[in-house]
Amino acid sequence: EVQLVQSGAEVKRSGESLTISCKGSGYSFSTYWISWVRQMPGKGLEWMGRIDPADSFDNYNPSFEGHVTISVDRSIDTVYLQWSGLKASDTATYYCARVDDRAGNHPFDYWGQGTQVTVSS
Amino acid sequence: SFVLTQPPSVSVAPGQTARISCEGENIGSRSVHWYHRKPGQAPVLVVYDDSVRPSGIPERFSASNSGNTATLTITSVDVGDEANYFCQLWDGSSDHHWVFGGGTDLTVL
């Protein structure tokens, strides 16, 4: 069974750093890209960026580039989303999702359960 | 970047048919994916590439896409279908590679 299991909820202060994780299982981890998606309170979903675990190639939505970093540790089938200086506006639920790039239009065929991040000013 | 617009909410009676729209300029020229998300659960892909159901998704879920509107249709709705439904497409021509609709809350009255 394919699963993406995310790390637990976090409560941080503005300016602090944070790394959350997404561990894949039940499939060949390096075969599928992983994307990160943000949902701010009461808002819709926003694609943040994605990484190819096979070669660590990443790219970002320009709205997030420079503020977050996506990385991978293939030895433990885990992708990370990292902030070096959190802002209160980073308060949101963050989802990781597997990208099915075998389908030409890249749907997200499996999702993690979400990680709630709360940042206080 | 591409903008996808969904109604905030749709309500239907049990046993009836729910239709959830996703509007975008010439969206019919793109391939649209649909998901649902129930409180406390991970989102689930219910239709991809306009009209293809993944394994395990009931035939009650179908979708179409033409002109400026993509539509997800759920027949014989029951309370278990209550969820937030959102559309998505891949826009490889822009930096915003994946675009999401704002989501629609389906309520079964």
Image (spheres, coloured by chain):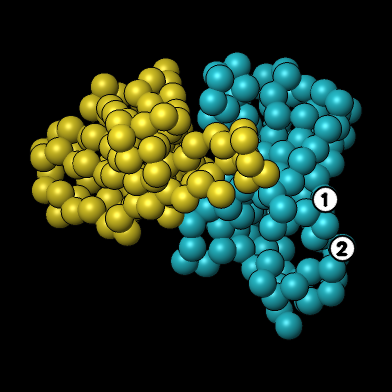
Chain colours: A cyan, B yellow
> Mark 2 falls within which chain?
A
Q: Residue at x 35, y 23 (%)?
A: B51
Which residue is label 2 attached to?
A84
- Amino acid found under the numbered disc labelled 2: Ser
Along the viewing direction, whichever of A9 and B59 lies nearer the viewer: B59
Q: How many marks?
A: 2
Q: Residue at x 23, y 27 (%)?
A: B60
Q: Residue at x 15, y 49 (%)?
A: B12
Asked which secondary structure carries label 1, the reply is: strand
> Mark 1 falls within which chain?
A
Within-10-Å neighbours for mark 1: few <14, some 14–19, many 20+: many
Q: Quadrant of residue A59?
A: top right
Along the viewing direction, whichever of B91 and B77 lies nearer the viewer: B91
Measured as percent of width and height from the top left, residue A63 is found at: 69, 57
In the picture, measured across the screen, residue A89 lies left or right of residue B45, that is right
**Residue B25: mark in rendering:** none
Which residue is label 1 attached to?
A69
- Amino acid found under the numbered disc labelled 1: Thr
In the picture, measured across the screen, residue B102 lies left or right of residue B97, that is left
Q: Are marks 1 and 2 on the same chain?
A: yes
Measured as percent of width and height from the top left, residue B89 is found at: 49, 37
Establish if B85 lies above or below B58. Answer: below
Measured as percent of width and height from the top left, residue B32 is found at: 43, 33
Establish if A13 lies above or below A33. Answer: below
* Mark 1 and mark 2 residues within 8 Å of each other at the beta carbon: yes
Measured as percent of width and height from the top left, residue B53 is found at: 37, 22
Establish if A101 lies above or below B106. Answer: above
In the rendered image, the quadrant that contains the C terminus of chain B is bottom left
Along the viewing direction, whichever of B67 and B52 lies nearer the viewer: B67
Establish if A84 lies above or below B15. Answer: below
